Amino acid sequence: MPYRTVQMSPEEILDHAGYRIVRVYKNDDYDQPLEYWMAVENEADGEYEEFDIRELPGYADIKLDDCVNPACRLERLRPLLELACENGTFRRMLGIEPGEERLFFVDVGRISARELTFEVRARTEEQARDKALDMAVNADFSKGREQGNPDYEVMEVRGDS
């Protein structure tokens, strides 16, 4: 019988402090998630760096023996992953030096509307553009406007250096 292969996004475990943690799968098969392996996304290039969660500092202190399902395990591991996001563990894993992010000022305009300027911290100009556009759409949405297909465009990006 024929079958169809469908590409799927990995299950997101955590999105915290600018890091996105996802599940890793044996042979990239969605039905075979690995128990101890996860991946952190490198925003600069969209690639993932895989890691063994047992190697994170503090893993040995977490009690998982009485967890009978994956949801319980993830809930107990969440504080450990959040700490790794905040304390520089993932930054070092991805090879990002402290201070590598720069401040960008991004002017975003909308057809027949005033221009907005956002201060955005990002590693690249492209990331700054994307973040500013998201901020503009979210600002519209929070004011009760529909979030359909906004006509925003980046007018100018200025770095702080």
Image (cartoon, rainbow, N blue to C red):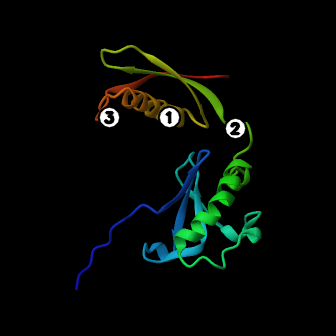
- Rendering coords of residue 71 (x, y %): 53, 69
* On-image quarter of the N terminus: bottom left
The residue that mark 3 highlights is: 147
N-terminal of the two: label 2 or label 3? 2
Q: Is residue 59 left or right of residue 66?
A: right
- Rendering coords of residue 55 (x, y %): 73, 68
Q: Residues within 10 Å of mark 3 (few under 14, many from 20)?
A: few
Tell me what residue is drawn at x 32 percent, y 72 percent.
5
* Amino acid on which disc 3 is placed: Gln
- Rendering coords of residue 56 (x, y %): 73, 64
The residue that mark 1 highlights is: 131
The residue that mark 2 highlights is: 100
> What secondary structure is marked by label 1?
helix
As rendered, which of 92 and 38 lies closer to the eye?
38
Count of marks placed on residues: 3
Dots 2 and 3: beta carbons under 8 Å?
Answer: no
- Rendering coords of residue 106 (x, y %): 51, 23
* Amino acid on which disc 2 is placed: Glu
Disc number for residue 67? none
Tell me what residue is drawn at x 70 percent, y 56 percent.
93
| Vertical placement of residue 135 versus 3, above or below | above
Q: Residues within 10 Å of mark 1 (few under 14, many from 20)?
A: some
For the residues marked 1 and 2, what is the alpha-carbon distance in whole angstroms? 17 Å
N-terminal of the two: label 1 or label 2? 2
Q: Residues within 10 Å of mark 2 (few under 14, many from 20)?
A: few
